[in-house]
Image (cartoon, rainbow, N blue to C red):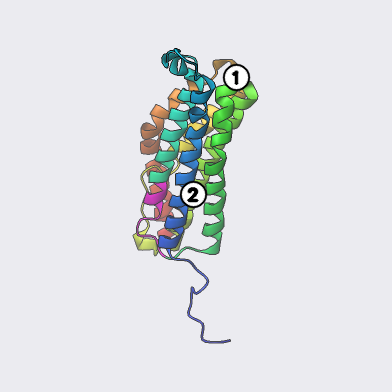
Amino acid sequence: MTGQEPGRDRLGPERLLAFSDGVVAIGLTLLVLPLAELVPDTDQEGASALPIITDNLAPIGSFVLSFAVIARFWAAHHRVFDGAPRVSPLLVWVNTVWLFTIVVMPFPTEMVGSFPEDPFTLRLYVGTLFASSALLTVMTLLVQRARPPAERTVEHGSGGTGAVLLVIFLVTLVAPGLGYWPLLLLFLTSPAERLLAPLVERGLRRARD
């Protein structure tokens, strides 16, 4: 059949965002389910509710951290597709893999609560965070490449979080005894983004030329 409109095989960003929002919402909901199960496990007549918190600081901490990180990734995901042209099949597949890292996140998060001292759990958790952030960076580059050269810009957060998480992951490989303290390096994300922005801008200028 001839006369098919160009780009007919491409999705609109609105459909992709709507589907992604639903998956992220499910991922965030799954994070809290293990905590909800702690209440009936400690339900005894006359018992205080405070030990539910004090005896489960590790799973509660991993839940709060994972919730905050996924929320940040979700906000970055929306910025990536803000004003984006129609998305290509490659971008759809990269987005699908990114959603996979989001729905998998409750699994290593619960492992952190159950095995807080296990180096494998530490590396799996940080590795999942890094993979999710790296895929966001890839999607940013794909969206920018789809735009006309004159409209290509540096997105806030392009690569900064991924770079910091890569450093944290490497630290977990060589010094697992530090535990989860290296995750505090995530507070350096904004300075890292400011450092990377000129490099990305330079690359975009070369692409325009």
Quarter where residue 105 is shown: top right
Instruction: Classify 47 as above or below 193.
Output: above
Residue depicted at 55% across the width and 87% down the height: 2
Q: Specify whether 33 is left or right of 72.
A: right
The circle on residue 157 is: none
Residue 155, x across and y down, in percent? 37, 48
| Secondary structure of the residue carrying numbered label 2 | helix
Q: Identify the residue position indicated by label 1 in the image.
A: 176
Q: Amino acid at mark 1?
A: Pro
The circle on residue 23 is: 2
Front in this rendered view, residue 114 or 93: 114
Q: Amino acid at mark 2?
A: Val
Q: Nearer the viewer, mark 2 or mark 1?
A: 2
Front in this rendered view, residue 139 or 205: 139
**Which quadrant: the N terminus?**
bottom right
Instruction: Classify 137 as above or below 40.
Output: below
Residue 153, x across and y down, in percent? 36, 53
Is residue 176 magenta-colored? Answer: no
Residue depicted at 44% across the width and 62% down the height: 15
Of the residues under marks 2 and 1, which one precedes in the sequence? 2
| Secondary structure of the residue carrying numbered label 1 | helix
* Residue stretch rendered in magenta on the structure: 76-85
Q: Tell me if label 2 and label 1 are in contact, CB under 8 Å.
A: no
Q: Specify whether 122 is left or right of 54.
A: right
- Separation (CA) of disc 2 from disc 1: 32 Å
